[in-house]
Image: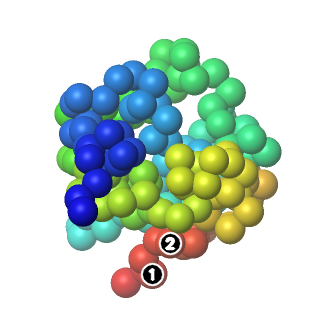
């Protein structure tokens, strides 16, 4: 017997444009990887992620310190939307927004599956307590801080 759509979670039954603001915001798994500074190779287009985080990022909570005003305070902060999420090739491979946009399910450790916001940290899939603020790192040092976070592909 097939389950009705009311038995299925919203991310399986709605496309991103149909989600309420609350549903959309709840997709964020709180990994913090998207708040890490990225570097792009001008020749190859390859994107590298560092362990240097945005000045607003709180490494203990894995949350933005001023989420509401982030775009005004950090002009290059990208605000995800149902329209742009599938175009942002630099988003982490493990990002719930990216996974849902690609028609994939949420991972077993996602808080919408487990009921706990701590589960992503418990399994080591976040950057919790593993990044340094951009305010504490010299700009010339950033390229030496490229890392591969859990769940992300190895560097070619």
Q: Looking at the figure, which quarter contains the N terminus?
A: bottom left
Q: Quadrant of residue 13?
A: top left
Q: Residue at x 45, y 81 (%)?
A: 154
Q: Which residue is mark 1?
A: 154
Mark linked to residue 142: none
Horizontal side of residue 82 vs 69, given as left or right: left
Q: Position of residue 67 (x, y in %)?
A: 57, 23
Q: Nearer the viewer, residue 12 or 31?
A: 12
For label 1, the SS is: loop
The residue at the far front in this view is 1
What number of labels is visible? 2
The vertical placement of 95 against 59, above or below, is below
Label annotation for residue 151: 2
Q: Quadrant of the C terminus?
A: bottom left
Q: Residue at x 42, y 77 (%)?
A: 153
What is the secondary structure assignment of the residue under circle 2? Answer: loop
């Amino acid at each position: 017997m097939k389950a009705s759509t009311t038995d299925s979670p919203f991310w399986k039954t709605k496309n991103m444009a149909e989600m309420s603001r609350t549903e959309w915001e709840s997709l964020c798994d709180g990994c913090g990887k998207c708040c890490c500074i990225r570097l792009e190779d001008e020749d190859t287009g390859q994107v590298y992620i560092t362990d240097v985080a945005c000045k607003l990022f709180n490494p203990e909570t894995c949350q933005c310190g001023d989420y509401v005003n982030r775009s005004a305070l950090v002009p290059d902060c990208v605000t995800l939307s149902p329209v742009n999420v599938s175009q942002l090739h630099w988003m982490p491979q493990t990002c719930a927004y990216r996974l849902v946009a690609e028609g994939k399910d949420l991972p077993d450790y996602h808080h919408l599956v487990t009921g706990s916001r701590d589960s992503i940290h418990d399994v080591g899939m976040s950057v919790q307590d593993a990044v340094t603020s951009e305010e504490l790192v010299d700009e010339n040092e950033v390229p030496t801080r490229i890392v591969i976070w859990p769940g992300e592909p190895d560097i070619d």
